[in-house]
Image (cartoon, rainbow, N blue to C red):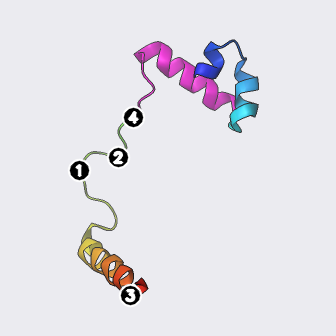
Amino acid sequence: MTYVDEGHGHREAARHFRVSPKFVNDLVKLRHKTGLLTPKKQGNGGGHGKLVGVAGWLKARVVQRRDHAR
């Protein structure tokens, strides 16, 4: 948000970074409220994603494809 701190307006910042003005406004509000721009934690924290049942298979496939590409 340095761009806004330098005196540029929210709409100008939105055009410059190709995001919506609402996104810029939300970032400015978040920084004003918390002092930070760190993202909020996603999900419920349970670690039970949709792919948890096939995680081992996926990891093996990635390794297999990586080895095959060499």
Indicate the secondary structure of the residue bearing disc 3: helix
Q: Name the residue under label 2.
A: 43
Q: Which residue position holds label 1?
A: 46
Write down the residue under mark 3: 68
Q: Callout 4, which amino acid? A: Lys
When the figure is inspected, residue 43 is found, relative to residue 58, above or below; the finding is: above
- Dot 4, how many residues are within 10 Å of its Cα: few (below 14), some (14-19), or many (20+)? few
The span picked out in magenta is 20-38
Residue at left offset 39%, top offset 34%: 40
**Circle 1 SS class:** loop
Sequence order check: which comes first, mark 4 or mark 3? Answer: 4
Q: Quadrant of the N terminus?
A: top right
Look at the image and say whether residue 8 sits in the magenta stretch.
Answer: no
Q: Which of marks 2 and 3 is in front?
A: 3
Closer to the eye: label 1 or 3: 3
Q: Which amino acid does label 2 sit on?
A: Gly
Q: Position of residue 23 (x, y in %)?
A: 62, 31
